[in-house]
Image (cartoon, rainbow, N blue to C red):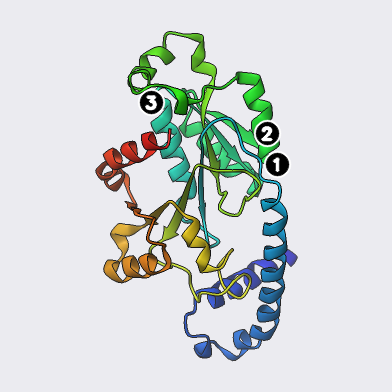
């Protein structure tokens, strides 16, 4: 009974979060707004304190780190993107280490392990990802591919299959790490659900945002998920660009295998640039 009540409450809050005109809510849902608004204010304060705390002790790993995250709750294509990036590097002869918090029973990690079975991908699970990463780097060793020459990078795939270095970690991929500030990253990828964007634009629990929209300026790459289903793509595109700083130029489409193949070469260029 308690589980059913929580599920109903979650659906109500979700409906409010993605209702752009709150004045059109039903009386029952409208009555929840004051409570959700106060909770959102406390969340914003806690978020600010937490961010300042973790930014004061950022841990830097000895190899490149790519973060995949988002600004809203729900499915935004983070895990498929992590799988795509890990598979790309594994095919290139660079052993990736995927770090996940493992929330929700670890279903996403289990799915990644199944899909990446047979590759050189390694997995680390835990809230303290810097600690988990340090342990696995010490266990397997690492190769800093940023210090290798272009010739060595081009022949890395052949080397990986003909030497003991194939076990050494060459890149770290963080799953759902937009708000994981304690670990330095070289590339920040933010996934955006093109169908829902940021809902009513409010912070949790009044809205779907995990951070204010200004956080999008930290992103190096923005990927629009479900791009093939967006009817007003240009409107979505302009909204994202309006929040982005001038230095950030990489925006990709991500929806199905067909779209991934269309952007594959651009991904390859982008990834190798940061290695």
Q: Residues within 10 Å of mark 1 (few under 14, many from 20)?
A: some
Q: Is residue 174 above or below residue 30?
A: above
3 or 2: tag closer to the N-terminus? 3
Picture disc at residue 132: 2
What residue is rendered at 56% in x and 53% in y? Answer: 178
Q: Position of residue 130 (x, y in %)?
A: 67, 38
What residue is rendered at 68% in x and 76% in y? Answer: 41
What residue is rendered at 58% in x and 64% in y? Answer: 211
Report the Cα–Cα distance between label 3 and label 1.
Answer: 28 Å
Q: Secondary structure at mark 1?
A: loop
Say if mark 3 contacts mark 1, CB within 8 Å: no
Q: Position of residue 201 (x, y in %)?
A: 51, 74
Q: Is residue 19 left or right of residue 45?
A: left
Residue occupied by mark 1: 128
In this view, the residue in front, 251 or 91, is 251
Q: Is residue 108 left or right of residue 189?
A: right
Report the Cα–Cα distance between label 3 and label 2.
Answer: 24 Å
Q: Identify the image quadrant of the C terminus.
A: top left
Q: Secondary structure at mark 3?
A: helix
Q: Position of residue 170 (x, y in %)?
A: 50, 26
3 or 1: tag closer to the N-terminus? 3
Q: Is residue 161 left or right of residue 134?
A: left
Say if mark 2 contacts mark 1, CB within 8 Å: yes
Picture disc at residue 91: 3
Q: Secondary structure at mark 2?
A: helix
Q: Position of residue 131 (x, y in %)?
A: 70, 35
Q: Is residue 42 above or below residue 101?
A: below
In this view, the residue in front, 138 or 6, is 138
Q: Dividing the picture into quarters, in which one does residue 175 lie?
A: top right
Q: Is residue 231 visible?
A: no
């Amino acid at each position: 009974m308690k589980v059913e009540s929580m599920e109903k409450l979650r659906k109500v809050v979700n409906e409010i979060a993605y209702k752009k005109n709150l004045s059109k809510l039903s009386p029952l849902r409208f009555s929840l707004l004051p409570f959700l608004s106060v909770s959102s204010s406390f969340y914003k304060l806690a978020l600010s304190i937490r961010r300042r705390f973790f930014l004061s002790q950022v841990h830097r790993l000895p190899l490149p780190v790519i973060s995949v995250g988002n600004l809203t709750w729900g499915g935004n294509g983070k895990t498929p993107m992590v799988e795509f990036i890990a598979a790309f590097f594994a095919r290139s002869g660079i052993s990736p280490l995927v770090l996940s918090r493992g929330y929700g029973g670890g279903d996403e990690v289990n799915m990644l392990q199944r899909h990446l079975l047979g590759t050189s991908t390694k997995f680390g699970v835990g809230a303290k990802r810097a600690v988990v990463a340090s342990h696995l780097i010490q266990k397997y060793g690492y190769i800093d591919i940023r210090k290798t020459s272009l010739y060595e990078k081009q022949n890395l795939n052949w080397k990986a299959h003909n030497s003991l270095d194939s076990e050494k970690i060459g890149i770290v991929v963080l799953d759902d790490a937009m708000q994981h500030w304690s670990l330095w990253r070289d590339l920040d990828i933010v996934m955006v659900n093109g169908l829902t964007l940021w809902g009513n634009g409010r912070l949790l629990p009044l809205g779907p945002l995990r951070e204010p929209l200004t956080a999008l300026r930290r992103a190096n790459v923005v990927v629009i998920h479900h791009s093939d289903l967006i009817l007003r793509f240009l409107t979505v595109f302009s909204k994202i660009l309006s929040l982005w700083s001038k230095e950030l130029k990489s925006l990709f489409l991500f929806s199905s295998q067909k779209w991934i193949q269309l952007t594959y070469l651009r991904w390859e260029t982008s990834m190798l640039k940061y290695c």
